[in-house]
Amino acid sequence: MKMNRKSYVLILILSGLILSALIFRNGELLLLASIFLVYLLFGVAQTPGNISLEASRDITMPGITTGESVELILTIRNQGGELKNLCLQDPLFPGMTVLEGFPNQRTALAAGETTRLNYKITASRGIYTWKTMRAVASDPLGLFEYEMEIPASGTLMVRPDPPPIRPIQLRPKATLPTAGPIAARKAGSGTDFWGIREYHAGDSLRRINWHWTARNPRKLFTNEFEREEIADYGLILDARRLTSSEEVENAIFEHSVNAAAALGKNFLRNGNRVSLLVYGKHVRTAFPGYGKHQRDKLLRQLAGAKLSEEFPFTSIDSFPTKLFPARSFLVIFSIYDDRDRLTYAQLRSHGYSVLLISPDPIDFTAGILPDTKVNSLAARAARIERVFHFNCLLKLGINVIDWQVDEPLEPLIRKTSSWRNTGRINREIT
């Protein structure tokens, strides 16, 4: 049993009246004190004794996407004695907004009676886990309380919901021996012309090159087309805090998560094999896979991605390369720290094709800070340093997209996919 502020005030008034009555020998004050004493004793007498509550939680859709709503229903059953004043409260997490109903309720429950607490919410991306709900039972006057945590477990996963993008093909160094949309630099069945060779038994007559055959009457020649296959793609999301501005990093990180989700869905939709690494204090992984099951796995891992304290790439030995098959195409989302340059070099030396998509924190921060000469010069100096680091990556054969998050990413990636050699996208420094 716990006394609340109301009971403390009542006891303080009662003590003051009794003390005043004794000092001034005033019976009227003592009579007035007796009224408060009766009030206090009534509260003590009505304080609930046998308290036993059970609760169950039902989430209509345990997995939703950002922007969708979900209804939570809690059923509370009284297994003990009568409770005349019961306050029920379900905790809300940061990022949640109540759309309908209320997450708290004050009611009375007879022995064996059941009540329900239901409300509808929307939430930002993340994984939310409830273990308990809060219940406070008190006397009818609200003087003495029993506060308890009732087990009521449940998990809600809010996946990222990126805007759809048109199919994008990033050409890796190697493909898998399965028909797909990527030109494999090999002769076979496809749509793009590859070359001409002598006719072999079993070749389709539709592919005979009659022009060359006419020039060599004793031989037949057939057209060859470039084979189209699927490939391995790896998505790496850098979840380390690399700057001193938490507000800027949180905003930029959400853009990176959505971009990773969009690219993952795009690669899987084209039949490719995709894996994921969320790299931070807590590593989240999805091993290579195909199809809708892999898409759900990627979105589930991205839903739980959170920024954490710095966990630098010190060497390729600490990098989980088993996630990414040899000669995969790696797409890395990172603000970029120059101390990671050695890791990028090692990834290239291991045969990976690497594309760094780097959200620009300088441009984002400059839009928040006051437009002063000092801030303008600081931003210019930071951009010069950033371009220098990216040029160093360019020499290692790393493609880099310097991404201003208020601009669409798809055209930049599409421009990258059209290059035959490695390059860099970057705007002019102003």
Image: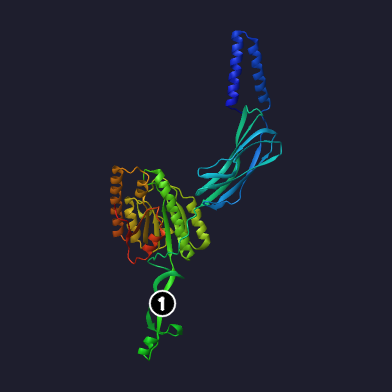
Please give the residue where the numbered disc 1 appears in the rendered image. 225
Quarter location, residue 35: top right
Amino acid marked by disc 1 = Phe
**Coordinates of residue 352 in the picture (x, y in percent):** 37, 62
Between 383 and 111, the one lying in front of the other is 383
**Coordinates of residue 1 in the picture (x, y in percent):** 61, 28
301 w.r.t. 373: above or below: below
**Coordinates of residue 374 in the picture (x, y in percent):** 29, 42
374 w.r.t. 399: above or below: above
Q: Is residue 177 visible?
A: no
**Coordinates of residue 394 in the picture (x, y in percent):** 30, 59
Between 127 and 280, the one lying in front of the other is 127
Q: Is residue 35 visible?
A: yes
Identity of the residue drawn at 59% across and 12% down: 20
Q: Mark 1 falls on what kind of element?
A: strand
Image check: 353 left or right of 87?
Answer: left
Between 186 and 34, the one lying in front of the other is 34
